[in-house]
Image (cartoon, rainbow, N blue to C red):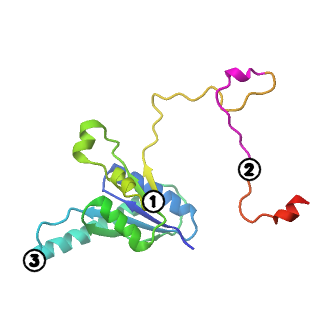
Amino acid sequence: MSEKIVVGVDFGEEGDLALHEALRLAKRLDGAELHPVHVLPKPDAVGRKDQLDVLSHMLSAAAQELRDRTLNVAEGMGDDVWEQHVTVHVRFGKAAEVLQQVAVDVDADLIVVGTHARRGMQRLILGSVAEEVLRLGRFPVLVARPKNTEGLTASETIEPPREGEDLHEQRTFSRSERLRFGQRDGHIAGMI
């Protein structure tokens, strides 16, 4: 059974980052399907032939741009060659609602979105597609952000105290081990 990943792509840095993370996941999952989605603003009124021609051209141009961006982001991920099942989607509407609908339509396992990481008044005015997708809450969501540890410091030690160290000075506990998941021995055989 393949994993289906829907990714919102806004033709900006945030969309490219979301696409990169979605591709990175899909590349690791054998048989995964990637569904990049670009959303165009909903047209006011449609009816005349010339309006339909313009909308058709917009859809076609956006689909080509989405395909090209997907290829460009994948090429920037390294020298290895791999194949990926990709279906591009371009729809009119509100971004969060369209992402949710595409996820329903393809029976997605995950939605990946980027974020502008706006704060304060700017966020209130412009809204947040990532926040709205999270609020709709029908699918697991991965919010892709650039890694930035500026202004943060790592813990002095992440390991548990060793014999002779002062336990009161230790404020963290970590344990690393290799765990085995999947089929286990029957509980009776394991007890004997």
As drawn, 131 above or below 98: above
Nearer the observer, 45 or 24: 45
**Quadrant where the image shows the N terminus:** bottom right
Q: Counting other residues with Cα less than 10 Å from the Cα at mark 2, is it few (<14), some (14-19), or many (20 or more)?
A: few
Q: Check if residue 175 falls in the magenta segment.
A: yes
The reply to whether the magenta stretch includes residue 102 is no
Mark 3, residue position: 47
Q: Local crowd at mark 1 within 10 Å, few (<14), some, or many (≥20)? A: some
Q: Residue 140: percent from the left, percent from the top?
A: 47, 58
What span is in magenta?
165-178
* Mark 3 crowdedness (10 Å alpha carbons): few <14, some 14-19, many ≥20: few
Q: CA distance from mark 2 to mark 1?
A: 31 Å
**Which mark is first along the chain, 3 or 1?**
3
**Which image quadrant: the C terminus?**
bottom right
SS state under label 1? helix
Relative image position of residue 64 (x, y in whole percent): 30, 68
| Mark 2, secondary structure of its residue | loop
